[in-house]
Amino acid sequence: MHAVHDVDALLLLAIAISSKRRPAELAEIIAANDLIHGSVSLKSDLTEAFKNLSSHGLIAQVGEGFTLTPVGLTLMSSGRKKADNEERLRGLKAAISAYALKSGHPVIQLTDEQMVAAIHEHEASKMHTGKNLLVPKPKPVVDAKRPLRRKPMPARRKF
């Protein structure tokens, strides 16, 4: 068992959300981080988390994007499917700390300039009115007096 920082679990969850069908770019990972946490983590914490997770073989760089390795995918699937973000983060943190560390994996080295550019790109994309799939959807308003109002069944006809 080893010490795991909160930002490690947050980054693992953000990569899992943003890289469903293809490797996620850095700005997409920042957007998922903002969606989960409510704010963007510090660039120094994120660069350190990229180093930690890649050195343990949980994330990998594919071209210009980042994705989870098969080991990272198994850690993600260990929790409940209907858990909220905080419960998932706690479960991920426990799963990462219980994971046996393996070295020899390529380490992802990101510069501060890359991180700042991705954060600025995310902030600029928040200003646009286009469709952003990583934005929480508003909940429908339910009337407290009559939550599910249905029409009554019609009376049966007698033949």
Image (tube, grey):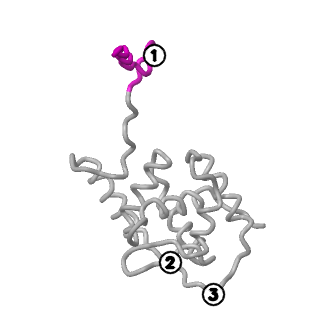
Q: Is residue 55 above or below residue 120?
A: below
Question: Label 3, on which residue?
Answer: 104
Q: Position of residue 13 (x, y in %)?
A: 53, 59
Tell me which label, 1 or 2, sits earlier in the chain: 2
The disc labelled 2 sits on which kind of residue? Ala
Instruction: For marks 3 and 2, give the one nearer the viewer.
Output: 2
Residue 65 is one of the magenta-drawn residues: no
Q: Which residues are magenta?
A: 141-159
Instruction: For marks 1 and 2, give the one nearer the viewer.
Output: 1
Q: Is residue 32 above or below residue 143?
A: below
Q: Are marks 1 and 2 in contact (CB under 8 Å)?
A: no
Tell me the residue at 51%/63% (across/down). 46
User: In the image, which disc is placed on residue 60?
Assistant: 2
SS of the residue at dot 2? strand
Tell me which label, 1 or 3, sits earlier in the chain: 3
Q: Position of residue 7 (x, y in %)?
A: 57, 58
Question: Label 1, on which residue?
Answer: 144
Identify which residue, 128 or 41, lies in the foreground.
Answer: 128
Identify which residue, 140 or 2, lies in the foreground.
Answer: 140
SS of the residue at dot 3? loop
Residue 149 is one of the magenta-drawn residues: yes
Q: Position of residue 111 (x, y in %)?
A: 43, 73
Horizontal side, residue 136 vs residue 36: left or right:
left
The span from disc 1 to disc 2 (Cα, nearest Å) is 48 Å
The disc labelled 3 sits on which kind of residue? Gly
Horizontal side, residue 56 vs residue 147: left or right:
right
Q: Residues within 10 Å of mark 1 (few under 14, many from 20)?
A: few
Q: Are marks 1 and 3 in contact (CB under 8 Å)?
A: no
The span from disc 3 to disc 2 (Cα, nearest Å) is 13 Å
User: In the image, which disc is placed on residue 125?
Assistant: none
SS of the residue at dot 1? loop
Horizontal side, residue 5 vs residue 22: left or right:
right
